[in-house]
Amino acid sequence: MPSERPHSEDYVPVPALSRASPHRGVAGAGFSRALPYIPMEGGVPKKKSPAATEREEPISHGEIRDAISVLEQALFNHVQWTDALNITLICHLRPDERDLSPNAHRECRLGQWYYNENTRVVRTNPNFTELEEAHREVHRRAAHLLGLSASRQEIPMADYEQFTHELKRLRLQIETLKRELEDEIYNVDELTGASTRVGMLTKLREQHELVKRKLETCAIVMMDIDKFKDVNDTYGHSIGDQALATFAHHVMRNTRPFDRLFRYGGEEFLLYAPHTDMISVRRMIERIRSELEKIEIISPGYAPFFISASFGIAILDPDVPVMDSIERADLAVYAAKARGRNRTVIWDPSLERAGTK
């Protein structure tokens, strides 16, 4: 009869992470009752109520830092878990039943975080989905090895090598996601919450490669606040900053989680919107434009005022360089201003021929 697996820090209840101390307490790879309870239905998290699916506020730096802390802890946890797993395999100890569960990938600490409804900060990142696949596969292969060991069967080298391969893939996914979150913190415009231009072209070129391979479609939207100089001259730069922040937050609240807004310069912004077509993106931008002009900007000593913006849309064209597609969106926004401002224009070749800019 196999011996009991020795008590491991893997399964000691762990205090909840705090921003002040991301590694507070003893944390194992595994299963902790100290994490917030996640309502489940049939092994999956409960769906949000309709009210919970309403437009979300822009993601804060605090949320991103919390996610980074969890990922750092997950790396530490999985090192501990792997060490304990290897001892169990080598010594033919009785495995922990939770490691054999089909839902082990949901019940471990990383899984509890992953399936928590509060992971909006990373939910739209492509690596987030890949992380789930890698994590599920690690637990599946671990359960297979533990089953062989518990029944005193020989573990084929190929099976163990495949497990270690999946474990390395999981750690790479965690590291990649963590690095991208760190980029989010350091490449965010503090005033508006939009991304800075640092890394913008890299992101668009990555998207461009997918478009060229016909794996993706993407739209680029150039945005320019109308008569912004008049706002600064009339109300002062602090109120101008408030108007910029109001505009950016309005756009980010009314776009999809995987769209990304960049502060292009001054009062100009660029939105890239993957997984879309021209009809859908125009509908989204028109909603943003029409609702923007209803938002009051409060300025002490002055009556509330309103701002508007002009929008130019272009498709990320697989047959031209990324900068050419940006230039097309720029030409379209200039056409919108020339036609009276506070409107949306879609690029077409006639704009270039007419020399709108």
Image (tube, rainbow, N blue to C red):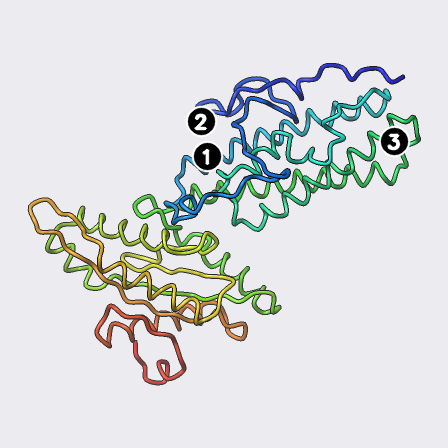
Q: Is residue 271 left or right of residue 30?
A: left
Can you give x and y, in whole percent of width and height, for residue 169 in the image? 69, 42
Instruction: Tell which circle, 3 or 2, labels the residue nearer the N-terminal end.
Output: 2
Separation of residues labelled 3 and 2 (CA atoms): 41 Å
C-alpha span from label 1 to label 2: 8 Å
Query: Residue at 53% of width from left, 37% of height from top?
Result: 116
Q: Residue under label 2, please give it.
A: 19
Q: Residues within 10 Å of mark 1 (few under 14, many from 20)?
A: some
Amino acid type at mark 3: Leu
Q: Secondary structure at mark 2?
A: loop
Q: Which residue is mark 1?
A: 65
Q: Amino acid at mark 1?
A: Arg
Query: Toward the viewer: 180 or 91?
Result: 91
Q: Which mark is residue 165?
A: none
Q: Secondary structure at mark 3?
A: helix
Nearer-N-terminus badge (1/2): 2
